[in-house]
Image (spheres, rainbow, N blue to C red):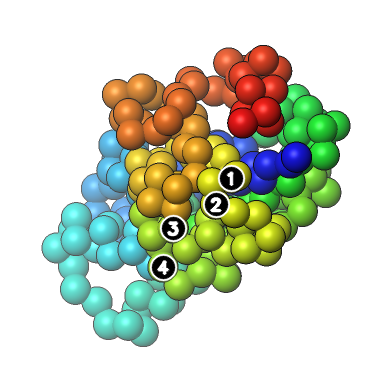
Amino acid sequence: NNKTFIFDLDGVIVDTAKYHFLAWQRLASQLGINFTPEHNEQLKGVSRVRSLDIILELGNITASQEDKNKWLIQKNTEYLSYIDELDESEILPGVSSVLNYLKEYQQNIVLGSASKNARPILEKTGIIHYFDVIVDGNDVTNAKPDPEVFLQGAKKMNASPTNCIVFEDSVAGIQAANIAQMTSIGIGEKEVLHEAKFIFPNFTFIDTTFLDNLLKK
Ligand code: G6P
Ligand code: MG
């Protein structure tokens, strides 16, 4: 009797949004675009390519594919310089205890992220060994709310979607989990993530009684 627990990365395991913000903001200001923290909120869970398009739309800029590719590389190079400094202190509160508890009870642990930088982030924070399977932005063609990333994870674990539980901080991610018929758990604000089956402000609110109930079902 075991379940498959699928974790989103950015905003669930690590707060990388602040590093994405710094890197996008440098590019935006270079292009004369005013990019604010509020704009950055709209980029959570959104792919790298789509994020650039949203920023260019903000500044009413049309660009050649060549320029876009150059800017994507520039942004990611700067982002990676922040990622390079990550350590385990950046793991969000309560995440490690939940991972340990699931491991202790021999549950499957999967990463389901849109990021192409997922592996270095898990390595730097020292938690890559918890994951039985990693599905990231290098593996999928359809972005959340398309359930592809989570369905790939389930398939690799030989698990039926109804036995999968997804932790997500983005609306699109919750929708993807629901479409896949998985149990969705929102990490964040109730008002934003109301489509989730369960919602917690962060992992410190997830106790062993709650996890035990998920294991039994
Ligand atoms: C996650 C983040 C997004 C980010 C995307 C791609 O979904 O929430 O903000 O744009 O991953 O990340 P990458 O590391 O490949 O640029
Ligand atoms: Mg996320």
Describe residue 147's horizontal placement relative to residue 93 as left or right: left
Which residue is labeled 3 in the image? 147
Can you tell which of label 2 and label 4 is closer to the viewer? 2
Disc 3 on helix, strand or loop?
A: loop
Can you tell which of label 2 and label 3 is closer to the viewer? 2
Whole-number angstrom distance, CA of label 2 to CA of label 1: 5 Å
Q: Amino acid at mark 4?
A: Asn
Label 2–label 1 contact, CB within 8 A: yes
Which residue is labeled 1 in the image? 164
Which residue is labeled 2 in the image? 161
Whole-number angstrom distance, CA of label 4 to CA of label 1: 20 Å
Q: Quadrant of residue 16?
A: top right
User: Which of the labelled discs sits on residue 184, or is there none?
Assistant: none
- First reached walking from the N terminus: tag 1 or tag 3: 3
- First reached walking from the N terminus: tag 2 or tag 3: 3
- Is residue 105 in view? yes
The residue shown at (29%, 36%) is: 38
Mark 2 is surrounded, within 10 Å at the Cα level, by few (under 14), some (14 to 19) or many (20 or more) other residues, namely many
Which residue is labeled 4 in the image? 142
Label 1–label 3 contact, CB within 8 A: no
- First reached walking from the N terminus: tag 4 or tag 1: 4
Q: Amino acid at mark 3?
A: Pro
Whole-number angstrom distance, CA of label 2 to CA of label 4: 18 Å
Can you tell which of label 1 and label 3 is closer to the viewer? 1
